Amino acid sequence: MSDDNILVNIENLQFDYGGKPVLRGINMRIPKGRVVAIMGGSGCGKTTLLRLIGGQLRPTAGKVDVAGETVSDMNHAGLYAFRRRMGMLFQFGALFTDLSVFDNVAFPLREHTDLPPALIRDLVLMKLQAVGLRGARDLMPNSLSGGMARRVALARAVALDPALIMYDEPFTGLDPISLGVIGQLIRHLNDALGATSIMVTHDVQESLQMVDYIYFISEGRVVAEGTPDEIRHSRDPFVHQFVEARVDGPVPYHFPAPDWSHDLAAG
Amino acid sequence: MTRLLDFFRFLGAQVVERIWRLGYFTRFAVAVLFKSGAALVRFQLTLREIWFAGVLSLIIILVSGLFVGLVLGLQGYEILQRFGSAEALGTMVALSLLRELGPVVAGLLFASRAGSAITAEIGLMKATEQLKAMDMMAVDPVARVVAPRFWGGVISMPLLAALFSSMGIFGGWLIGVVFIGVDDGAFWSSMQASVDFRHDIWNGIFKSIVFGVAVSLIAVFEGYDSEPTAEGVSRAITRTVVTSALTILALDFVLTSFMFRGIS
């Protein structure tokens, strides 16, 4: 694939937290217009990777290039200019609890544009219509269900028509219907906006249905990658354990511990 | 020997931690001042915080001011009439309130009512990733969330202290003149004769501005720096109230020493 078509290019990305390596040399090339899932067990460094792409963390080594610009080289103003072209959906929505649904979606428009109120109103209603919540515009976040809050957050994330949308565990804690709705919305919004989406998740079945490409991360490294079809038919033991939800495998069930009989005898 | 070394190591770590935190606090304070543009240009952001920090604190400030004034009136009359100076009650009530009790007690009440609320709000916004979301939307949370709350507190505090003192004087008048029977004219004229605008009223206003800056800065800092958990936010609120109270009392001593240094 030509470099022109690559929106996010990650090279040998390493990140240490408190002297402990979290990411140990990640390489990824994410083309424009695709929906890419990053999967892995809890604590494997998926969210850290998103924060590195968004410039909230700086890598220990390696680099993240977005649209040809290295994120860690940007100054504060450059980083904010870059983030205006990016949307992010947080795990539990992170809606502003003192603002109504309408004002939450209007927030980035009011902060970053000088558009007249009438136009902002139309844009907000269009975004809310796209997520099916135009009728909920006057509600406050505390009166929304988890799935609705996630949809409002999604409308807010795409308010400025971003080129890159990142999703941090968008399916966590949702019932099957809401989960399907969010999955479809991610796909449709990405295609409608001509954006590129990076989704961190551990929901295998939903992801296999809607993404273009999947990276599996374990212990800070990419251990497998491929299209949903390749992943379904993969013989890789890690992928097999993850997709089939096996308790034990390359990802051990037990946290490292001294010998069991030795521990019992010591009591 | 090892225990002694451990003790000194612990002591050293505590001192280094405190100094580090003080440095961090100072950098944070400078950042808040530099990023205050939005809070002052888009003044409706600050007005909203004046409503929450100031207007919603009115009841506790006014009621407390009234009771402090009532008590001052009673105690003042009881002491002054021993020396045959009951007509100086107005002077005593006014000076006590304008110089000390107004700014200090209003500051303490402000810290516990509004300061704790500011810390809780910012801390919970942090715990629920709202600040992080704002930062990812290229909106600086210090400029958009912290600075308006800081200025809201700074503007509210002197106004609340002034209302506290006014209510206190009214309370002193009520108990002294209406209930006990001190001469109304003497009460007000002695007050008018002895209260100096620069020495008493302005010094009191200055104190309340300083306390407002201190409490607001502590409140926003503790919220912004809180650990993003329920326990962390709760600890931050406690730190706001305790640190603000101690800071107000310490600053009051320092300011009073400077303001009345000519007296010997």
Image: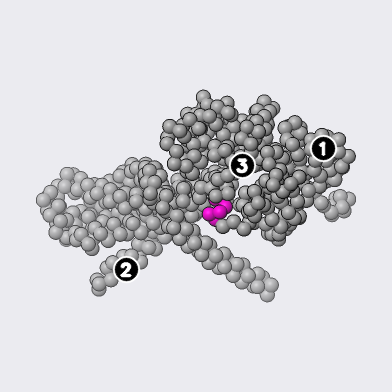
Residue B159 in sight here:
yes
Which residue matches tag 2?
A: B257
User: Mark 1 Cα within 10 Å, few/some/many (few <14, many 20+)?
Assistant: many
- Give the percent coordinates (x, y) of residue A257: 82, 52
Q: Secondary structure at mark 2?
A: helix
Give the residue at x 20% y 59%. B197
Of all residues shown, which one is farthest toward the bottom? B1
Q: Using the numbered discs, state the Cα–Cα distance from disc 1 to disc 2 in whole angstroms.
A: 75 Å
Residue wearing tag 1: A231
Q: Amino acid at mark 2?
A: Ser
* Labels 1 and 2 positioned on one and the same chain: no
User: Chain ID for label 1?
Assistant: A
Q: Is residue A174 magenta?
A: no
Q: Quadrant of the rendered structure where residue A194 is? A: top right
Label 3 amino acid?
Ala
Give the x, y percent position of residue A53. Answer: 65, 49
Q: CA distance from mark 1 to mark 3?
A: 27 Å
Magenta stretch: helix, strand or loop mostly: helix
Q: Check the residue under mark 2 and report the chain it is in.
A: B
Residue A196's label in the rendered image is none
Which label's residue is closer to the chain start, 1 or 3? 3
Quarter of the image for residue A178 reads top right
Q: Is residue B192 left or right of residue B233?
A: left
Task: Label 1: state its secondary structure.
Answer: helix
- Residue range of the region highlighted in magenta in the rendering: A76-80
State the mark number for residue A163: 3
Residue A12 x, y percent position in the rendering? 75, 55
Q: What amino acid type is highlighted by mark number 1?
A: Ile
